[in-house]
Amino acid sequence: MTALRQSLELGLILCRTCGLAVSRASLLDRRCPRCQSRIEQRTPFSTEMTLAWLIAGIVFYIPANLLPVMHTSGLLGEADSNILGGILEFWRSGDWDIALLIFIASVAVPFTKFIAIGLLLLSVRNNSLWQQHQRTALYRIVEFIGYWSMLDVIVVALTSALMQFQVLGTAEPRAGIAFFCAVVIVTMLSALSFDPRLIWDRRA
Amino acid sequence: MAVNRILICRDCDTVYRAIPLRRGDVALCRRCDAVLARYFGANVESGLALVCAAAIFFAIANLTPILSIDIAGIETKANVWFAVRSLQQGWISVAAFGLAFTTLLIPAVQIALLFWVLLFARLGHRPPGFGPIMRLLHRTRPWSMTEVFLLGALVAIVKLANWVPITAGPGVWAIAALTTVLALLGRCDPASWWSIVPAVKA
């Protein structure tokens, strides 16, 4: 079994867009010879961009939860509902499975992303050798769960589309849902900005 | 000059010499377990067939109702476009843009670009604009949310079923089929698409 070596030691560089291994010596203009995309040993300003998008995500998450996401009016009167209220309502009415699903998509997933990305940034900053394998797995989990938080935006949109001019009531979207959509997009940008190879780099 | 037959792990930058893979094989990184390469079973014909199927399912999903409710003979229908329209209110429209982008524009662009690439590959030509197209496909990959829309539609059914007579339209099945086909196409990694297209003459 030969020793595992990183591309830098072997004078190679990976094009992350098309997967081609390019020799550094032949690289003239920082462009991949096959697909012409920009090619870098490490994503430039990876940790800075990741942190900036992460902070934006945490900031947007506050109004996303405090502001109402939907306004309903009907025979039982008018009501504003926010995300946590909606989950509680499902829970009380016995639809525990839907309550759990929305809780996972709207609360657990964003929080997991905040904590996981924060942990990755902190450990990379400290040049940590701790659990490199598990931290890479954590990065892949963050990437995978990224877009499922869009669930609530879709549910509110479909509910509002169906409950228009109805005898039984109407539903309209409210500001919270825009912030929630922003949280999803911004935290996805945060995860995409993170270069997992930093976990494995040994900087002197 | 490019170095061929070498794999570099996307997640930890470890370098490997590539070996031929058999059907069902997945090459994993020894250090971090990332997928380095998969056996590439899809040839141009089956790829093209999958893209055509995706285009048909996409059309059905957007032309037929996904959900509909019927109260006293008045029917209200909803599909992806209606969902986007219902979010168009003042500055909440930001969310409408987000939804339109991830559930309409991105899937449509992906299907169109893959069709373009595979059609030319089938005819034995290098598709015009191949490099930029592959870059765009790579960039848009994380932003397609068809499967989340499917789950959202199912949640909406359960949520509204307590109040109103709600039924799932043909659009739900089309979205489910679209999700499956896009997942099959997505499994093929970009590096493999490069290898099936005739190389440019240097």
Image (cartoon, coloured by chain):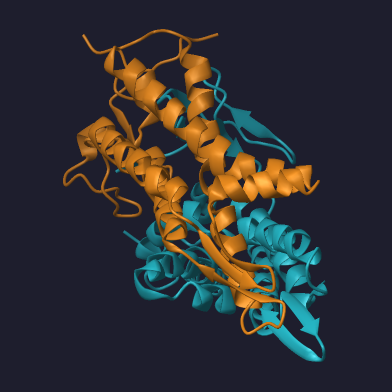
Chain colours: A orange, B cyan
Q: Residue at x 76, y 90 (%)?
A: B74
Tell me if residue B107 can be seen. yes
Q: Is A188 situated left or right of B164 in this image? A: left
Q: Is A59 situated left or right of A25 in this image? A: right
Q: Residue at x 35, y 16 (%)?
A: A123
Q: Is A114 situated left or right of A133 in this image? A: left
Q: Which residue is farthest left?
A: A29
Q: Residue at x 26, y 48 (%)?
A: A38
Q: Residue at x 38, y 57 (%)?
A: B135
Q: Nearer the viewer, residue A91 or B189?
A: A91
Q: Position of residue A183 (x, y in %)?
A: 41, 48
Q: Is residue A19 above or below residue B87?
A: above
Q: Nearer the viewer, residue A183 or B158?
A: B158
Q: Position of residue A130 (x, y in %)?
A: 43, 8
Q: Is residue A129 above or below residue B123?
A: above
Q: Nearer the viewer, residue A187 or A30?
A: A187
Quarter of the figure that contains the N terminus of chain A:
top right
Q: Is A133 situated left or right of A183 in this image? A: right
Quarter of the figure that contains the C terminus of chain A:
top left
Image mark count: 0
Q: Quadrant of residue B145?
A: bottom right
